Amino acid sequence: MAGLGLAVVATADLCLKYGDRVAEICSSYRHAQDELKEQATKAASSWMRVSTQLKFLQKIESKLTEEHRIILDQCLRAFSTKLVEINRELESYSQREETGSSRLRLRITRVKYAFKKQHLEKVLETLRRWDDEFDPTWYLTILIADRQLDDELTHGTGVTSNAIQSARAIRSTLHESDQLGNARKGLSLSADELQSMDMKQIPFCNAQVASRGGNGKFYVLDEIVYHELGDTASKIARENVRNLAQRLQHDSPETSGLLQCKGFIPGTTEQVADDVTKYTLVLRGMKGHHNPRSLRDLLVTRTVLDSLSTKFEIARTLARSISYVHSFRFVHKNLCPETIVTFQHTEDSRLSTFLVGFGDFRAEYGRSAMRGDDLWERNLYRHPSRQGATPQDDYRMQHDIYSLGVCLLEVGLWESFVEYDERGTTRRLGSALQLPPNSEPSAYLLANMKDNFVVLARNSLPRFMGTEFAGIVETCLTCLDPDNIDFGDPREFMDSEGVSVGVRYIEKVLLRLNELRL
């Protein structure tokens, strides 16, 4: 165990060594054309964030579990190999010159000057890939209950980056005494802020888009409604919403698949019943994005995607978003195509995917109300033990992972499991599910649907997405089965911080999805 810890520290050192060299060479590009200058600045900024995280991990490595270290070591080794390769290529196009001081200056050879843009793009893509693979592990580390992490975040990093500020803010909500300082003031917003905005409903989704004027700035409004709360439950609900809003003030929306939160509105101007408590999360829309559409809208209209790579990217982002929600110590409880929103990039046709629909969320280890509903279109995405008006089991992270498996299956087949009539009102189970004729939805869902999903994953999905993707989907769909070797034994996940199941999820789902690139 100690040997593995030393390996993590040593590999992180290697990443820092070659990453610093790459950053140094990229900085010499800042005197080039505007486009190259912008890319060089992005690369330097990204590396500063990464190096801060690596140095922090080296200091708290002894607090990690062995399984956590194995995942980290795997990520770091792949990253260091890529950095060494990029450094070798960049230095072959550079020359070092004495400056008359102790420092060296890099000069790019003019003959190969045209390759600079290509290499900068490669650096940025490597750093983006690192963010995709490492960020879930980074936020999982923040869950570890140890005073050393607080001390290092507050005093030991030597530099304040967005990553450290975000980690510090999240940990502040994990401490009852707010030992790192209360950063949650000002999260409560006035409903008056929405009065002058134009509202637009996102198709097949409960969320709305609010915008003002033509400056391109917009917000996504996500409602959270509680019914019949007593005084104590009402206080807990408000604190949970406040904590969620705080933890969603992270610095990596596109990587996490979670929009950054501006704050929440504790009740809007419209009238609601006396037994209803209503909150609205105000999520910041990303600059350069437009045309919001739910995943259900894309599936129902059979929207043609640019490439197979888009489906893989949607799948990876969804998987990361659930990891982040769990790292923030919440369970989502409502993952389905209606709670997944895509935006198109203004400059091209690329899609960015985000998880919304936090209407049923709760604290990960909060008390489950054991109250559900009989809506088959919602039970379709629930594990059998959580279906119906009175679910059998307490909700836990694996139930979100099961729902993710259903969504990934639907994305892979690219056929909606819920179909609508021409008016878009009457719903029925989709033909893609290959159900027996005259099946009654609620009864079939409870007795047979999970097994039917597994059959589809094994027999139909490989033709569209490959056997490895199909295997990942099956892992998610069977994560609550006693004989599932990855998630089946609940005794392996008894730690109060939720780190064990989070690490296993990264290993068995996230990293495997990240390896699937065309």
Image (cartoon, rainbow, N blue to C red):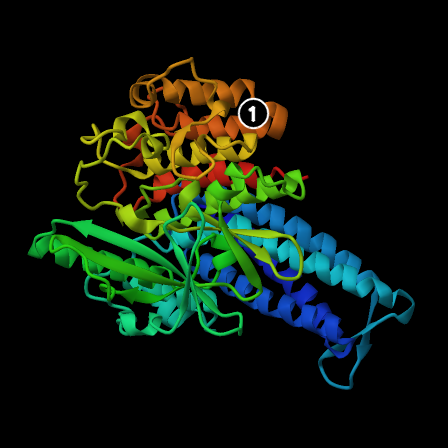
Q: Residue type at mark 1? A: Leu
Residue 260 lies, with reference to residue 29, above or below; the image says above
The quadrant of the picture occupied by the N terminus is top left
Residue 483, position as x, y percentages in the image: 37, 19
The quadrant of the picture occupied by the C terminus is top right
**Is 182 placed left or right of 10 in the picture?**
left
Residue 18 lies, with reference to residue 440, above or below; the image says below
Decide if residue 174 is in sight here.
Answer: no
Residue for point 79% across, 57% down:
89
Residue 169, position as x, y percentages in the image: 34, 66
**Is 232 placed left or right of 226 in the picture?**
left
Residue for point 53% across, 74% down:
215
Q: Can you identify the residue that label 1 sits on?
A: 461
Name the outermost residue toward the left: 231
Residue 449 lies, with reference to residue 406, above or below; the image says above
Residue 424 lies, with reference to residue 5, above or below; the image says above
Residue for point 42% across, 13% down:
437
Residue 226, position as x, y percentages in the image: 19, 51
Query: Which structural element holds mark 1?
Result: helix
Locate residue 373: give its quadrant.
Answer: top left
